[in-house]
Image: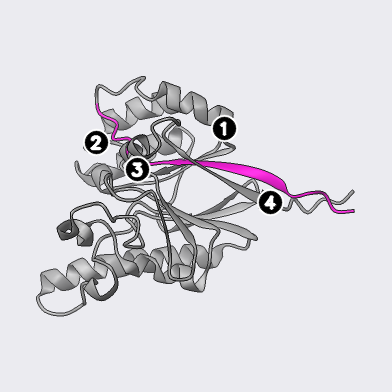
Amino acid sequence: MADQPERVRLAAVSDIHYSKTSQGSLQSLFGHINDSADILLLCGDLTDYGLPEEAEILAKDLAAVKVPMIAVLGNHDYEAGQVDKVKQILTEAGVTLLDGDACEIKGIGFAGGKGFGGGFGRGTLGYWGEPAIKQFVQEAIDEALKLESALARLRTEQRIGVLHYAPIQGTVEGEPVEIFPWLGTSRLEEPFSRYPVAAIFHGHAHNGAPEGRTIGGIPVYNVALSLLQKSYPEQPPFRVFELPVNTGHSA
């Protein structure tokens, strides 16, 4: 008789914005994660200005995390132009960084990347006009293509999408409508219509909505730290999501 599927718990949080003075600030959160989850997802804006010094401080605090860690970077992590150094520091700290990449941990496939802006639905910026506009749109297209390529490489039954920018408008609702185009784009939703996943996690929209769904019904979770603190003040500020994973063993 086949074994019952194992339940794997994911903890997800983003926009922790580590600065030069942040050491120890999330010790309690990381302690809760060790007790509550089997895998930690960090959905971008891990540092405040993208400085190696900030990444070093975060790396020291992440040493307290005893579960596998998967992350994407956010726009803040690019600010200082030292993203390669930030990546190196976090990778050496045991974080699996996804940038159009895929990985498998505990029988679950993860595909992710930073993503980009550009707007949603009929408001999505088109590839037309001045070269600067075309360059902006091309960045969003490239990020979506990287994500699709990563999803296509996954062969696991259970799959998860990890982003920084939002793939749907639903989870940025609550932010000023004028800044929606800078918070994400529907172009990031399109790959999931071809390669469905169990859930998508992102951050970036600190005042958005904690939950939404794609057109195809995939749950999308905005896990920005400050949003979770406001939305669920009685809980530790991270989202826990459980997945059944068939280990393939038989009894």
Q: Magenta region: which residues?
A: 1-19
Measure how far apart labels 4 and 2 are at the Cα level: 35 Å
Residue wearing tag 3: 224
Badge 2 amino acid: Asp
Residue wearing tag 2: 48
Dot 1 or dot 4, earlier in sequence: 1
Measure how far apart labels 3 and 2 are at the Cα level: 14 Å
Residue wearing tag 1: 36
Among the 4 quarters of the image, the one containing residue 91: top left
Dot 3 or dot 1, earlier in sequence: 1
Q: Nearer the viewer, mark 3 or mark 2?
A: 3
Q: Is residue 154 left or right of residue 204?
A: right
Q: Is residue 66 visible?
A: no
Dot 3 or dot 2, earlier in sequence: 2
Q: Are discs 1 and 2 less than 8 Å apart at CB?
A: no
At 27% from the left and 28% from the top, the residue drawn is 53
Is 44 a magenta residue? no
Q: Is residue 4 visible?
A: yes
The percent position of residue 70, horizontal first and vertical second, equals 48, 43
Badge 3 amino acid: Ala
Dot 1 or dot 2, earlier in sequence: 1
